[in-house]
Image: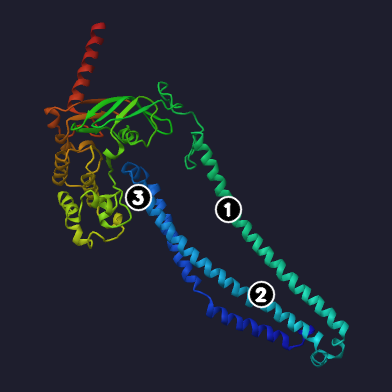
Amino acid sequence: MHLASGGEAPFYMIGYFFLSGVVLRALSPPFGKYTAVEQKLEGDFRFAHSRIIAHSEEIAFYNGAEREKEGVNSSFDKIARHVRKVYTMRFANGILDSVLVKYCATMTAYYLLARPVFDPSYATEHMGRVSADPTKIVEDYSRNSGYLVNLSQAVGRLILAGRDLTRFAGYTSRVSELFEVLEDIKKGRYERTMVTKNEGPSAPQSQAVNTNDLKGKVVTQDGVIIFDKVPIVTPNNDVLLKELSFKVTKGTDVIIAGPNGCGKSSLFRILGDLWPLFGGTVTKPHPSKLFYVPQKPYLALGTFRDQVIYPDTKQQALAKGFTDQKLFELLSVVHLGYLIDREGGWNSVQDWADVLSGGEKQRVAMARLFYHRPQFAILDECTSAVSIDVEGIMYEHARQSGITLFTVSHRPSLIRYHEYLLRFDGEGNYQFRKLDKEDMQQTAFGFGHGKSKRIQKLEEDDRDGEDADTENSV
């Protein structure tokens, strides 16, 4: 440009770009700040999904799908509104950028290149007689303008095409995986990608359970839970128990014992429709009349009131007649009345999973149970971090409220609050019987480890009989 248009032309272009930069900086929105806000909103959105993934079983037991859906949709709406606002600003700012930096800059360059063509005196003064030759001027103008336009357009298209193709490839890959999973689910076959296949010989399974066909039947009936020849089988086709049968009517509390991995929690997953039913018949009340309280309670995103009434909303709680005063009475039962003042009232919003201690979380979950007051409650080690005296108060209140209890616990102190025992031995066998006075006096009862004195005595008698038969045969 210096040779074709004179020495002043480059300084004119530099000055123009400097002035354009000042104008753009003054008129451009703070996109850096908006990007930070967008990242925070996206983080909240991802966090909401990760909570659902981590607590999917608890949410399913609580029937909290609609409540979680509202929370995720609200988080998404915040992102959508923010992104829509930012994109509108980017569109307007892009037009301004194009006008000042692209089109006006090109027009300025063309003007500087064309000055020698339309002003021969300028060409003679700044470029000399040789360079001022009309043929030379037109040649330089044509060549330089062509280079300028073609180079800028080519580089721009190349950069935009590469960026768009990379982004598009990422989207198509994820969408392709989604369609593959949806097709597998449609065919009734889905294998999680995080599960590593075992290429070696598979573990022996009972041939009595056909895991390729779902032949189980579910019957809805109030006031009773019946398992009739129901196999306990995991979604990975591991048979934990070939056949389980028992009947529990309303008002008959059952305590469940057994070693880890024997099928205690698996029983509840089948009861809550989280695992497939491969056979037998399950008779149970409507899901709204079953309530699950896990060892590590799920605390939702929201106010302290939301923790007690989850998955209901404040309006639904008021429709049921639960004012803040009645909710406070429930907290008083579980000895948590002090939390209202300590945490700033019912409308306080915090990360409750970090704020509350382990025992407080479990007592909040029990207050939630008393709020919903179902026919049957499944208590899965839900008072392991609570003192024995408060635990007894909560169990007495549950029984007085007409809630039938299914309790998994290793605490012998809870035997007195139940009438029946369902015990797994971890080897595919179980025992369902009525508790008696001898059971009430047990101090170890074999919860999770060992066996009760009665079972030990029966096994010793069996061994003595076998030894006597061996001696007689000799």
The residue shown at (27%, 32%) is 258
Q: Nearer the viewer, residue 254 or 371?
A: 371
The total of numbered circles placed on residues is: 3
Residue that numbered label 2 is attached to? 102
Q: Quadrant of residue 119?
A: bottom right
387 versus 375 height, above or below? below
Q: Which amino acid is tagged 3?
A: Arg
The residue shown at (66%, 83%) is 14
Closer to the observer: label 1 or label 3? Answer: 3
Sequence-wise first label, 2 or 3: 3
Closer to the observer: label 1 or label 2? Answer: 2
Residue that numbered label 1 is attached to? 170
Q: Which amino acid is tagged 2?
A: Lys
Query: At numbered mark 3, what does the secondary structure look like: helix, strand or loop?
Result: helix
Q: Which mark is residue 65?
A: none
From where the camera sits, is residue 283 visible? Answer: yes
From this viewpoint, which residue is outermost toward the front? 319
60 versus 198 height, above or below? below
Label 3 packing within 10 angstroms: few (<14), some (14-19), many (20+) = some
Query: At numbered mark 1, what does the secondary structure look like: helix, strand or loop?
Result: helix
Q: Position of residue 395 (x, y in %)?
A: 16, 41
From where the camera sits, is residue 427 visible? Answer: no
Q: Quadrant of the N terminus?
A: bottom right
Q: Is residue 199 left or right of residue 17?
A: left
Label 1 packing within 10 angstroms: few (<14), some (14-19), many (20+) = few
Q: Nearer the viewer, residue 206 or 148?
A: 148
Residue that numbered label 3 is attached to? 67
